[in-house]
């Protein structure tokens, strides 16, 4: 049978069953040859806030989401398709009821099947079954609505299929009269135009089924490269299924591409146009200036507009703007303002902007509208124009040309938009050619004319040194100061940064606090978090009580932005965890900060659960938090997760995964990721060895202050991995590593001086450095001191000192120290010969992994030195030494 082509069409079954996505295609997908990972939950709700019945239905929804594709999901969809196409005159027949029961048997949360069961129960006067089914419908609808409030695309309700939305909204008292498909930058959502059943109030809600579609595609073995690719699949599937909302999206695309005739051909012959389709048709007639056809539909468009349908208002406004009558022009502006009151400035401006983009460039009409506006109106249009590309993405060259013209026109009326246009010229965005001189001229002229926003932008250009302007922090400070004098909150904020970090002015923490406070008082809520940062991080003014108060003030303010709440929650969480040791409160603050978008908070939670010092160690939870942080752009988290997989810390050791996460981290600019990825290339770990790539990555990491990269560069030069050994350069990097806090590398610096490699030989200085390292329990330094005093070549021989240094290193589990002590007791160097004690030291050295210790232990067992002869043990240790490359061990094994 062909699948239903109604608005409730089962698109997602089409994309699972037919990869060609062609109408009623019958090509079956082959069973995948590899195991597909079991999906997680569709909905992850806080179970503590749900009652027993809600938890039951939540589990049922997730159970079907995880169900087997071949055995459950596809059979269920086939049954639902049959129910959807069932002839109305045989509703509730035995065959119909049998099919209903089969659908519910496969999916206890099948809303369509439950709706039919409720209808049939009422018809059969089975009050008990009707009530039971209505309760189930209510609970399932309520649970799905908890996935999002539906008020914005970001809060879209998650469903399995679109027909569910109609049922859910009916349960919530909403009547759906049309559906619009929106292709956003990285997803597809559905915009539902509704009327409240109680008072007829028009409203808009959003829903999406992309998560469910993605799961089905994954289980059928179809790769999804990225969210954009998934969105393309959803749209194409809906178009091939002739879904009305998708076709309307296609019509709108044709209008944006200035192809109105296609829309007219598709819609003009239809006798029963849907609301949105009629709006699109009128836009097509406006496109070709067919006034007669426009007038034919105008009454309907006006009725839609009066009902609150903003898209219809925008089209009616376009019609009014074609008039020369001042009353019509004023009417268009008034209509826009009514839409602002009904839907908010952003939604109204975005709808009207969309209407302009669906028509050919009309500078005269837009100018007429702008002439009726004041600054408050300009604000919404500026926001809509600048956000359009970010929200929708994938805009054509024609669309970008229209956006550019509209922004340029708006700039003639509104300085902020003029600065946006200048930025467009500087960056060459929206497929425009970069015109740097023209863009700079706009900003410079407006700055000199005293516009505070231009002064701020000009200061930023001087601070960053962009577009041919040299970095000049003093000039940047001056422009910020001029802007701040006019109360610009961003300029006040930047002055706070300047005084904190000595950018163009001497560092002054008190002035920094003062300017951040002024910025906060002027409405820049993030500045309140910066006040907290200073009091919690800067030693000269540190006051954790003040810091906590600053963070809490932002969190308590109900109008604080999500960004500010995230930053302050993270800052306060840091104090509670690391200073006040209030672990539970800190974890809650970090969680909230992460949920609000602070990647460092999720990173911190990953670190906490990986470490397990103040909480129960939970590597899996650490991985989950690191992954969340990575998805938000944390390259530090990628480095840490890579290290977990490299070392097998709480997870199965997986060098391929480690390489993948190190690559993500390094590509994102993390010095830790760059250093660790370099080491993989240096030694050819699960990647082809490439010394030059390793060297380049170490240099990038070193340039960002990474101490391990400094040490690794020193080693590469010392051991001649880049050619001939270069001891001088090696010592330079070793010293840089020590300066950056790598205390263990001081041993390498000492080595440079003791042996005159890369530095003029200075034994006393080298020994002094070794002694400093020894005081910090550096076992390499202790062993080297032991060796120096044992052979007496560079310092006066002192065998007792040598023994003390070896013993100290041995107590810190150093295998070289154990081996040296074994030699001493074997040969009576500074001690009485003691074969038994010698053997014990050799065996300890071997157990700590030293090849020479393994060989000495094997010989002891072989020849009965300090222990009974034991050929089996001898062979065991010879094999271990052989595996570590000992030629002597290999030779002895052959002779055995």
Image (cartoon, rainbow, N blue to C red):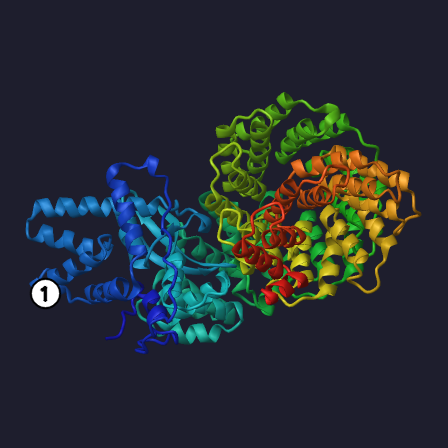
Left or right placement of residue 501 versus residue 229 in this view: right
Residue at left offset 66%, top offset 31% = 533
The answer to whether residue 441 is above or below residue 812 is below
Foreground residue among 606 and 336: 606
Residue at left offset 87%, top offset 48% = 755
Left or right placement of residue 798 versus residue 882 in this view: right
Callout 1: SS: helix
Quarter of the image for residue 744 reads top right
Quarter of the image for residue 293 reads bottom left
Foreground residue among 117 and 37: 37
Residue 172 visible in this rendered orientation of the protein:
no
Quadrant including the C terminus = bottom right
* Spot occupied by residue 292 in the image (x, y as percentages of width and height): 43, 70
* Spot occupied by residue 698 in the image (x, y as percentages of width and height): 73, 55
Quadrant including the N terminus = bottom left
Residue at left offset 34%, top offset 35% = 48
* Spot occupied by residue 170 in the image (x, y as percentages of width and height): 26, 49
Left or right placement of residue 607 versus residue 778 in this view: left
Q: Which residue is mark 1?
A: 95
Left or right placement of residue 22 versus residue 379 in this view: left
Q: Residues within 10 Å of mark 1 (few under 14, many from 20)?
A: few
The answer to whether residue 797 is above or below residue 631 is above
The answer to whether residue 618 is above or below residue 515 is below
Residue 39 visible in this rendered orientation of the protein:
yes
């Amino acid at each position: 049978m062909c699948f239903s082509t109604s608005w409730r069409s089962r698109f997602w079954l089409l994309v699972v069953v037919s990869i060609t996505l062609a109408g009623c295609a019958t090509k079956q997908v082959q069973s995948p040859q590899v195991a597909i990972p079991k999906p997680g939950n569709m909905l992850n709700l806080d179970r503590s806030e749900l009652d027993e019945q809600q938890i039951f239905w939540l589990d049922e929804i997730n159970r079907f989401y995880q169900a087997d594709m071949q055995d459950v999901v596809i059979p269920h969809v086939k049954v639902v398709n049959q129910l959807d196409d069932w002839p109305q005159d045989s509703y509730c027949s035995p065959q119909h009821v049998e099919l209903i029961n089969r659908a519910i048997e496969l999916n206890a949360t099948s809303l369509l099947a439950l709706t039919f069961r409720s209808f049939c129960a009422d018809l059969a006067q089975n009050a008990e079954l009707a009530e039971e089914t209505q309760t189930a419908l209510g609970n399932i609808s309520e649970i799905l609505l908890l996935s999002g409030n539906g008020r914005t695309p970001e809060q879209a309700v998650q469903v399995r299929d679109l027909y569910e939305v109609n049922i859910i909204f009916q349960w919530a008292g909403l009547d759906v009269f049309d559906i619009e498909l929106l292709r956003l930058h990285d997803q597809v959502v559905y915009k539902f135009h509704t009327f409240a059943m109680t008072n007829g109030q028009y409203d808009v809600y959003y829903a999406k089924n992309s998560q469910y579609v993605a799961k089905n595609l994954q289980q059928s073995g179809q790769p999804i490269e990225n969210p954009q690719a998934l969105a393309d699949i959803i749209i194409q599937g809906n178009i091939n299924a002739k879904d009305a909302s998708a076709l309307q999206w296609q019509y709108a695309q044709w209008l944006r591409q200035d192809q109105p005739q296609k829309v007219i051909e598709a819609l003009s012959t239809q006798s029963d146009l849907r609301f949105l389709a009629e709006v699109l048709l009128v836009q097509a007639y406006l496109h070709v200036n067919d006034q007669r056809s426009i007038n034919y539909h105008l009454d309907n468009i006006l009725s839609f507009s009066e009902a609150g349908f903003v898209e219809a208002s925008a089209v009616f406004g376009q019609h009014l703007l074609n008039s020369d009558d001042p009353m019509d022009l004023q009417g268009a502006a008034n209509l826009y303002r009514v839409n602002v009151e009904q839907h908010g400035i952003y939604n109204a401006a975005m709808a009207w902007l969309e209407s302009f983009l669906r028509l050919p460039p009309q500078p005269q009409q837009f100018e007429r509208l702008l002439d009726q506006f004041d600054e408050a109106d300009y604000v919404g249009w500026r926001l809509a124009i600048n956000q359009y590309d970010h929200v929708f993405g994938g805009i054509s060259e024609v669309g970008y040309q229209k956006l550019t013209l509209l922004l340029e026109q708006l700039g003639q009326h509104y300085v902020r938009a003029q600065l946006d246009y200048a930025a467009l010229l500087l960056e060459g965005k929206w497929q425009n050619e970069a015109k740097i001189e023209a863009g700079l001229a706009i900003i410079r002229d407006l700055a000199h004319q005293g516009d505070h926003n231009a002064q701020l932008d000009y200061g930023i250009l001087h601070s960053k040194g962009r577009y041919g302007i040299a970095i000049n922090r003093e000039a940047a400070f001056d422009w910020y100061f001029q802007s701040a004098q006019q109360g610009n909150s961003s300029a006040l904020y930047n002055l706070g940064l300047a005084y904190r970090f000595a950018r163009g002015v001497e560092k002054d923490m008190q002035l920094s606090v003062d300017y951040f406070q002024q910025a906060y008082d002027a409405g820049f809520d993030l500045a309140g978090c910066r006040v907290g940062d200073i009091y919690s991080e800067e030693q000269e003014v540190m006051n954790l009580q003040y810091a906590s108060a600053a963070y809490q003030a932002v969190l308590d303010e109900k109008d604080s932005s999500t960004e500010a709440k995230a930053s302050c929650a993270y800052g306060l969480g840091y104090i509670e965890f690391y200073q006040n040791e209030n672990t539970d409160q800190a974890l809650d603050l970090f969680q909230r900060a992460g949920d609000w978008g602070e990647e460092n908070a999720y990173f911190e939670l990953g670190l906490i659960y990986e470490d397990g010092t103040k909480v129960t160690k939970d590597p899996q939870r650490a991985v989950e938090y690191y992954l969340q942080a990575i998805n938000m752009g944390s390259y530090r988290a990628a480095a840490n997760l890579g290290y977990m997989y490299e070392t097998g810390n709480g997870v199965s050791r997986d060098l391929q995964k480690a390489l993948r996460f190190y690559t993500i981290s390094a590509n994102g600019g993390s010095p830790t990721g760059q250093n660790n990825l370099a080491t993989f290339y240096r030694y050819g770990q699960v990647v082809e060895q490439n010394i030059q790539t390793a060297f380049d990555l170490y240099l990038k990491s070193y340039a960002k202050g990474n101490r391990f990269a400094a040490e690794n560069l020193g080693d590469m030069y010392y051991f001649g991995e880049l050619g001939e050994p270069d001891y001088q350069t090696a010592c330079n990097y070793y010293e840089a590593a020590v300066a950056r806090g790598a205390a263990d590398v001081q041993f390498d610096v000492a080595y440079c001086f003791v042996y005159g490699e890369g530095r003029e030989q200075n034994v006393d200085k080298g020994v002094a450095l070794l002694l400093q390292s020894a005081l910090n329990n550096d076992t390499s330094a202790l062993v080297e001191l032991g060796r120096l005093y044992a052979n007496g070549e560079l310092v006066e021989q002192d065998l007792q000192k040598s023994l003390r240094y070896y013993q100290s290193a041995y107590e810190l589990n150093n295998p070289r120290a154990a081996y040296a002590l074994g030699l001493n007791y074997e040969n009576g160097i500074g001690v009485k010969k003691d074969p038994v004690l010698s053997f014990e030291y050799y065996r300890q050295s071997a157990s700590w992994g030293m090849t020479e210790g393994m060989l000495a232990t094997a010989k002891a067992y072989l020849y009965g030195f300090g222990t009974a002869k034991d050929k089996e043990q001898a062979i065991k240790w010879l094999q271990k030494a052989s595996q570590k490359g000992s030629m002597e061990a290999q030779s002895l094994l052959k002779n055995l």
